[in-house]
Amino acid sequence: MEKLDIKNIGSCKDKVLLVCDNGLFFEFALKLADHFKKVYYYTEWKNAYPGMAEAMIGTEWKNGKRLNTFDGKNIERIENMFSILDEVDCFFTPDIYDGDLLETLEASGIPSFGSGKAEKLELDRYETAKEMKAIGMDVAPTIRIVGMAALREHLKKNEDKWIKISKYRKTFETFHHINYRLSEPLLDNVEATLGPLKYIVEFIVVDSIDAIVEEGIDAYAVNGQLPTKMFTGCEIKDVAYAGSVVDQKDLSIGNKKVNEKFLRLLKKYDHNGFFSTEVRTTKDGKNYFIDPCMRLGLPPNALYQEIYKNLGEIIWGGGNGILVEPNIDNMYGMEVLISSGWHSGNHQTVYFPPEIRQWVKLINPIKIDGTYHVLRIGDSSTIGSLVAVGKSHEECAKKIEKMAKLIEGYDLHIKTEGLNEATEAFDIMIKNSKK
């Protein structure tokens, strides 16, 4: 395993980083400003009728003037990434959909960290299932169906299936088909939304898996190698997350089996970046890898920011093909979502004291005269999360509960009661994975 050699590649403290994102990971880029000399931040905002909000993500304003910093950190939101490429030492894509750009910049000689061609493993679910099966991974029976009419006919004859879509995540969320009577209203809604696209849309239909435990990892890989330490955790959907750093040698048998084979695909697609796995393990010892996540996890990327003390070196080293081990002083982390029904249709203003700023992670933020606003991009009610790290989940939960009382905003909700549920789910996962 290669080690970071400053004599060969230098320190990230002297480097300029360009982050190309879709708005979800501004806080991650902001944290990287602590590690790099300068960070440029870009999200795509151009189309035939561009909106102002998309172009303002990650900007700070004072007395009507735009600053080239945010929270006093040396991070600058830009509107044209190509105008500053001659300054850039490293390129980072925390999300998917920019694989082609990463490949282009990497070919031009700019060290790059991100999914690149490996984003295909998330964006083409059917072909990925075939590839995983071909290398001996456990894959639930999966079929591809084109067109809404064909999907309806299939679902009328079959029950207990999971319906998914590749690539176009805005179209609809994965849903569980129990039987046609229950699914029909949802199918009607999807068909109305699709309009003429209903004739050509591709659906992925997957059999349900009766799992005794759901496990997985949140990690990064370089040249088909994993660090010795990585993250694992449990999410209570849209509420809370509990996780911890684990040693690779202490992973469950199921995780080890999946990692060993999946790393072959990562190497095949020249992946140097973050990824997450979700493994469903059954009584008969099969380990089904569900839907590769070829980007920063959401959660727990907010916890990476505070647990990985050498985050910049991880990305700078990875961009140069060098696997850097994480520097960690807290093993546990928890996260609770901050949400607002108001935000699903409006921009959201949020107030909190500066002493907890480090632990508040906002999505699509803008800062105007010292006040934070979360710009409405899409219709999500989530505006960010509140995180804590420590020596135990109990310590993290206490910190979050205390800080949550200091955050205000119209129709704002922070469901700290979900922390206990997340902790219990985590403990069950760890217990079951050791059996």
Image (cartoon, rainbow, N blue to C red):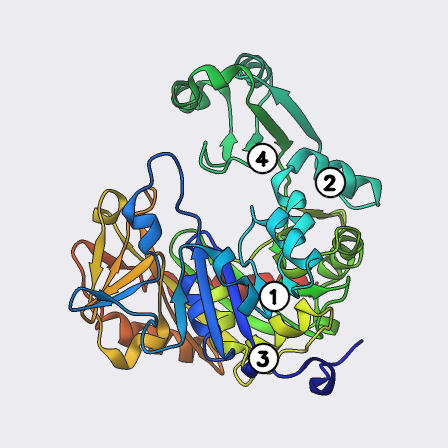
Q: Position of residue 166 (x, y in %)?
A: 58, 35
Quick one: 103 or 120, which is closer to the camera?
Answer: 103
Marking on residue 197: none
Given contact means CB atoms under 8 Å apart, are the residues at marks 3 and 1 in contact?
no
- Residue tagged by mark 4? 166
Q: Which residue is mark 2?
A: 139
Pointer 3 or 4: first along the chain: 3
Type of residue at label 2? Answer: Val
Number of the front mark, 3 or 4: 3
Does residue 423 appear in the picture of this structure? no
- The residues tagged by marks 3 and 1 sit, at their Cα atoms, a distance apart of 36 Å
Report the Cα–Cα distance between label 3 and label 4. Answer: 36 Å
Q: CA distance from mark 2 to mark 1?
A: 23 Å
- Horizontally, residue 5 falls left or right of residue 173, namely right
Q: Earlier in the sequence, mark 2 or mark 1?
A: 2
The mark closer to the camera, 2 or 1, is 2
Residue type highlighted by circle 1: Ile
Q: Quick one: 78 or 345, which is closer to the camera?
A: 78
Q: Is residue 329 above or below residue 359?
A: below
Choose the circle earlier in sequence order: 4 or 2. Answer: 2
Q: Where does label 3 land, which residue? A: 12
Check whether the beta carbons of the residues at disc 3 and disc 4 lie within 8 A of each other: no
Q: Amino acid at mark 4?
A: Ser
